[in-house]
Image (tube, rainbow, N blue to C red):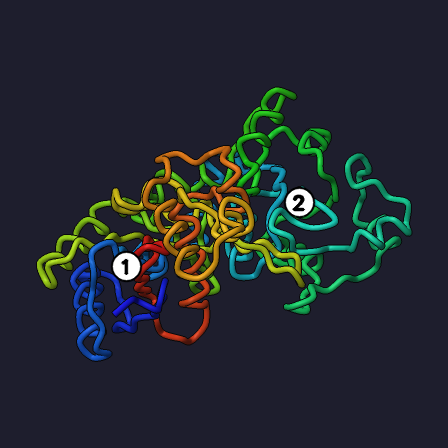
Amino acid sequence: MERKVGTISRGVRCPIIREGDDLAAIVASSVLEAAEAEGFELRDKDVVAVTESIVARAQGNYASTDAIAEDVRKKLGGETIGVIFPILSRNRFSICLKGIAKGAKKVVLMLSYPSDEVGNELVSLDMLDEAGINPYSDVLTLEKYRALFGENKHTFTGVDYVDYYSSLIKESGAEVEILFANDPRVILDYTKRILTCDIHTRQRTKRLLKKAGAEVVCGLDDILNASVNGSGYNEQFGLLGSNKSTEESVKLFPRNCMPFVEAVQQQLKAGCGKHIEVMVYGDGAFRDPVGKIWELADPCVSPAYTDGLEGTPNELKLKYLADNDFSDLNGEALKAAISEKIKSKDDNLVGSMASQGTTPRRLTDLIGSLCDLTSGSGDKGTPIVLVQGYFDNYTN
């Protein structure tokens, strides 16, 4: 019988993961048990995706605010430091900020506006227009910001992040001064030692600051890129991708994940005889159309994946073929013509009119986004996602 179903995404439950657990064995057995319990078959080219959170938990990749403070003090000198372009998030940045402030005598906190890098809004564009403020050139002190815009609470969390971050810095024992600007070089009027906290624009920010005369420039990726007194670390991303664990500690992005995904692939092969691709995923790469918040607060969607997930889709647009190449056909003749076109398509369709409107994104970004939406971030209890039929097309 002809297959009637395309891509399927399933959340898979597993035990609560603790440090030291054999996660590869747990993931493989959970997927195999789910297939048996639900009565579906595993196939070659299925994808098993594992959220970065449980990988880091199994690794025990945690760090305290004291470890953050020590590294900040060592790398930035422990006096007045500029902390610029953080995202507005209790989960993502508040505990990092505690540790940073513990490692300095004074923090000059410079916030981007009207929103942070991922879309969390401090003020609306309409408010800026009404006030006659140009966010590309105007620098606002805290006093001017309050006079123009007053108190602004986050749409979803109800938090005034200006006040919240200021309080965290003071409670951690440092003085605080707050600015609002979008040119990173503004901070050099206040200090020459800078910790830039942006995620996806960090390399440009570092380059501009160094060229403009900064004495020391670090990014979050430079803090805890090695262990401090036995703490967790991430040699590639440092504090980037970290999440709040407790009020005094963070869970870091997992490190050295390739041996893990390869081990899961091998154990699944041994268990079911199928060649299954495996990846670790974090935030999906998509934007909320209502809140205007871009989901990707991790430094990448997938820090590790097996070889079969390398590359981008190479697909034809079915509606383009139906409306153009085969506009004179219907029914079985149309189906046969489109099927033959797909079977004979070029290996590289970049620039082809018949591929316009398809998404030229990396496979891991697309699949990781699907997995993030499937697993959610709350209490679903499915940190493993099985994706089937993703590499099928109309002819399968």
Q: Position of residue 247 (x, y in %)?
A: 48, 64
* Label 1 sits on residue: 48
| Residue 238: numbered disc | none
Q: Is residue 247 left or right of residue 236?
A: right
Q: Residue at x 58, y 58 (%)?
A: 89
Q: What amino acid type should be assigned to the residue bearing mark 2?
A: Leu
Q: Position of residue 221 (x, y in %)?
A: 45, 39
Q: Quadrant of the N terminus?
A: bottom left
Q: Is residue 194 left or right of residue 52?
A: right
Q: Residue at x 44, y 53 (%)?
A: 242
Q: Look at the numbered disc 1 and give the secondary structure of its residue.
A: strand
Q: Position of residue 42 (x, y in %)?
A: 20, 65
Can residue 62 be seen by looking at this rendering? no
How many numbered marks have been drawn onto this rendered protein structure? 2
Is 308 drawn above or below residue 264 in the view shown?
A: above
Contact between marks 1 and 2 (CB within 8 A): the answer is no
Q: Is residue 68 left or right of residue 27?
A: right
* Mark 1 vs mark 2: in front: 1
Q: Look at the numbered disc 2 and give the secondary structure of its residue.
A: strand
Q: What amino acid type should be assigned to the residue bearing mark 1?
A: Val
Q: Quadrant of the C terminus?
A: bottom left
Q: Position of residue 192 (x, y in %)?
A: 63, 28
In terms of sequence position, does the residue under pointer 1 or pointer 2 come before the other? 1
| Residue 109: numbered disc | 2
Q: Residue at x 12, y 63 (%)?
A: 272
Mark 2 Cα within 10 Å, few/some/many (few <14, many 20+)?
A: many
Q: Specify the quadrant of the image occupied by residue 267.
A: bottom left
Mark 1 Cα within 10 Å, few/some/many (few <14, many 20+)?
A: many
Q: Nearer the viewer, residue 57 or 320?
A: 320
Q: Specify the quadrant of the image occupied by residue 127.
A: bottom right
